Image (cartoon, helix red, strand yellow):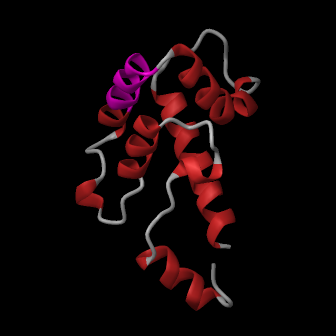
Amino acid sequence: KGKNPHELIHAILTAPLPRPSVVGHDIPDELDDVLLQALRKNPAERYRDADDFAHVLESTKHHLSPGAWQSASRRFFTPFVRYQKRETRSSLVPVVLVIIVLLVVAYLLWG
């Protein structure tokens, strides 16, 4: 949050990002950790590329209970499902959607 654009930019660059589970209480800790790494301020601490992020996201899915993953993924992906082509099975689409949603949440938290 900031009172003006300068304060907002300063907060984005310096303030710690809140855990996604603070906003969505049904988000499991394991998914919190994956999302926070994807959003690190230092690019060297983020995932190397979208494939790495997708791989970690997919492996996290297998460690969570089905109910926990369904609840968290429903929160992120349901609004976007109607825009996906049914024949497309790319793992990049969910990754891009998660990033977009997280950017919107970050903007809403700090805006």
Residue 102 in the image: state x and y as whole percent. 57, 50
Q: Quadrant of the N terminus?
A: bottom right
Front residue of this view, candidates 107 and 60 = 60
The answer to which quarter of the image holds residue 40 is bottom left
Determine whether 100 is above or below 93 in the image. Answer: below
The residue located at (64%, 26%) in the rendering is 71
The mark tally for this picture is 0
Residue 33 in the image: state x and y as whole percent. 38, 44
The residue located at (66%, 11%) in the rendering is 86
Span colored in magenta: 54-64
Determine whether 52 is above or below 9 in the image. Answer: above
The answer to which quarter of the image holds residue 77 is top right
The residue located at (37%, 20%) in the rendering is 63
Front residue of this view, candidates 1 and 92 = 1
Say if residue 89 shows up in the picture. no
Say if residue 29 shows up in the picture. yes
Residue 59 in the image: state x and y as whole percent. 34, 22
Would residue 60 be counted in the magenta stretch? Answer: yes
Front residue of this view, candidates 52 and 18 = 18
Q: Quadrant of the C terminus?
A: bottom right
Of all residues, the one furthest to the top in this rendering is: 87
Residue 61 in the image: state x and y as whole percent. 43, 22
Would residue 70 appear left or right of 40 to someone viewing this image? Answer: right
The residue located at (36%, 65%) in the rendering is 41
Please name the predominant secondary structure of the magenta segment in the image. helix
